[in-house]
Amino acid sequence: MLNYGHIPHVATATFILIMSILVIYLIRITLKEKREEENFEKQLKFAVNPGFEEKAKTSFINDKLKILPENIIKSGIVGEKYKVEDLQRRLILIGALLFTMTTFFTRNLVAGFVPVIFGYIGLTVLAMFKISKNKNLMDDQIPAFVSTFKANIQANQHSQNAMIRAIDNTASPLYDELAYAKAIMEAGDFRPGIIALRQSTDNETLRQMASCIELASSSGSNIEAQIEIIEDIIADKQAIERKKKLGINENKPLFIVAGLFIPISFIGSYVLSEMHRDFWFKSLLSWVVLIGIMISMIISSYATWKVIQKVDIG
């Protein structure tokens, strides 16, 4: 029979079960999204270039280690002069120094991971915040850019000149995203520039627009008709995004309370309970539990965000 002494074991098992389900759910959603995007890219590449040969993939670990440096460069935290590989080596060196110094002063191997984890999380959150801010600004600029491009096409300008002039009339940060494609168009032809835009941009709307224009130019279809379809898609997406933002803003107090509940409970119990002070930061187990709690909070927050993004807005 279960008694009071079994409560910690039951609670721990329940917590592990819930977190395992969350992790499995996140992995399935992420892999599904990645497969769909890869399949779309393959179909598009084979449609415009039947002789396309796929390049060999790099290792999984190498790809994951490049995520943070790439996000830091995209967010503008460091200058564009930095290469991903150079920044990756610097971050690994800084992480190793933090781990070594913390381990040396605390005489605790697990404690060495704490500043590394906090540094990684802090840089990731800052980079994603800046990327999200730039993305929102670009999304607000895209409708005007597409309308300018359409107006240039209607004025009987060649697609290449129409796109270049539309880019010239665009301000940052959208101009910075389009500058590489513009340089290729000025040096060559329209289609290579559109392909470069589709491959280089991380903005979903720009990538969809480039894909539609690329297919239209390769098949000889009417680009103006494609642009009108793109305008309708952008308008629908912006309406959905406005509804999502409204829902998030209305529930922001709930998110804040949920996010602060565990940290406040931890600080309160540490200050008020001598038993907790005797446990935390004293043993290897306490550090393992603390890191586990931090990882669990990150996974839970990320899972909640992914669920919110999947909500259908009527």
Image (spheres, rainbow, N blue to C red):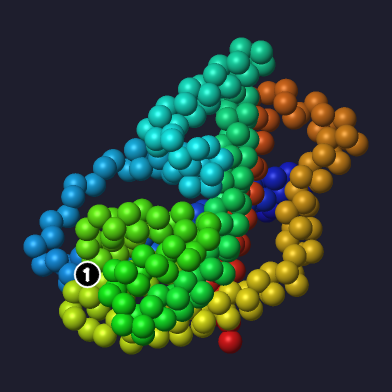
Identify the residue under disc 1.
43
Q: Name the residue located 48 percent from the left edge and 66 percent from the top edge.
A: 169
Residue type, mark 1 in image: Gln
**Residue 51 position in % (x across, y down):** 9, 62
Query: In the displayed structure, would residue 262 be above or below residue 287?
Result: below
Indicate left or right for 139 with 190 as reference: right
Query: In the displayed structure, would residue 106 be above or below residue 256?
Result: above
The residue nearer to you, when weighing 212 against 303, is 212
**Residue 263 position in % (x across, y down):** 76, 45
Q: Quadrant of residue 291?
A: top right
Q: Is any atom of residue 292 visible in this view?
A: no
- Give the SS element for disc 1: helix
Q: Residues within 10 Å of mark 1 (few under 14, many from 20)?
A: few
Query: In the displayed structure, would residue 132 be above or below residue 148?
Result: above
**Residue 63 position in % (x across, y down):** 35, 43
- The C terminus lies in which quarter of the figure? bottom right
**Residue 94 position in % (x across, y down):** 53, 24
Indicate left or right for 211 with 10 as reference: left
Q: Name the residue located 29 percent from the left edge and 58 percent from the top edge.
A: 186
- In the rendered image, the residue lying farthest to the right is 272
Query: In the displayed structure, would residue 196 be above or below residue 284?
Result: below
Q: Is any atom of residue 129 visible in this view?
A: yes
The residue nearer to you, when weighing 272 against 181, is 181
Q: Name the residue located 37 percent from the left edge and 33 percent from the top edge.
A: 85
